[in-house]
Amino acid sequence: SATLIAQEETPDKRLVASAATFHEIMAAPDRAIPIYLLERAQCIVIVPGMRKAAFLVGGEYGRGFASCRVPGSWSAPAPVRLAGGSFGIQLGADSTDIILMLMNQKGLEHLLSDKFSIGADLAAAAGPVGRDVNADTDVLLKAEILSWSRTRGVFAGASLNGTVVEADRPEAIRLYGRPWSSREIIEGAITTPEAARVLMDEISRDVYGKK
């Protein structure tokens, strides 16, 4: 199907698409992720071009990458899959870019465990937009994971409750040559392939380079 073909592009192309997605979102100050949230985030997950999946009844499917803070930088990207859930939007034939941010140690540990459910395992909230927005509400302060979506060029906070995030071992084999776990990749037990630099550099630039 067209959905499966779209999802089966190479990891290298998906890394470039992930970097481009994050760059485009952060380049629009009035609709970007607030800087103070980027500075607090433990991990960022980027899923470019998530689509309605014909084989998931009422669900969606997407592949992307997670990167977490390591001393002085961001980790090599760990391939992840998102599946199920209800996005509160009708994807139809459109693709939707998804951004998740894990805000604390509990969020990080769930990501490193290779599989968790948004809203069930982690307290979730739709993320605010606007680079200089300061939205220190109780909901945001208590949220362990924040989520956004971009459809037809419109970037906004999105509820992804019920969506499962899991390690994408087949993608790890294609990118790293072995089915490394998210923990092994993020905690640095591997040599970072050159193809992964494009995303790591983009995250570092957007988080540290735009005060």
Image (cartoon, rainbow, N blue to C red):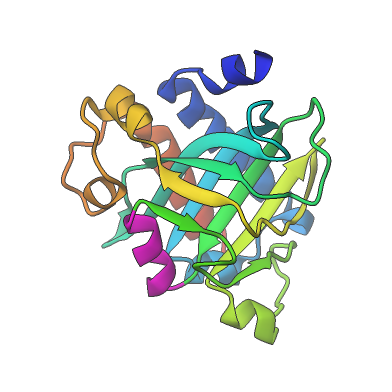
Q: Is residue 124 above or below residue 4?
A: below
Question: Taken as a whole, is the magenta stretch helix, strand or loop?
Answer: helix
Q: Quadrant of the C terminus?
A: bottom right
Front one among 179 and 85: 85
> Residue 193 at what x, y percent from top left?
27, 30
Q: Is residue 190 above or below residue 172?
A: below
Q: Residue at x 41, y 52 (%)?
A: 115
Front one among 79 and 75: 79
Q: Quadrant of the N terminus?
A: top right
Q: Residue at x 68, y 54 (%)?
A: 148
Residue 100 horizontal side relative to residue 138, left or right: left
Q: Does any portion of residue 164 appear in the rendered image? A: yes
> Residue 63 at what x, y percent from top left?
51, 34
Residue 195 horizontal side relative to residue 192, left or right: right
Front one among 175 and 166: 166
Magenta-drawn stretch contains 198: no
Q: Is residue 144 above or below residue 24?
A: below
Q: Residue at x 61, y 64 (%)?
A: 146
Q: Quadrant of residue 125?
A: bottom right
Residue 48 horizontal side relative to residue 148, left or right: left
Q: Residue at x 57, y 42 (%)?
A: 83
> Residue 208 at what x, y percent from top left?
47, 59
Q: Does any portion of residue 201 appear in the rendered image? A: no
> Residue 200 at what x, y percent from top left?
40, 43
Residue found at the far front of this picture: 57
Q: Which residues are magenta?
A: 104-113
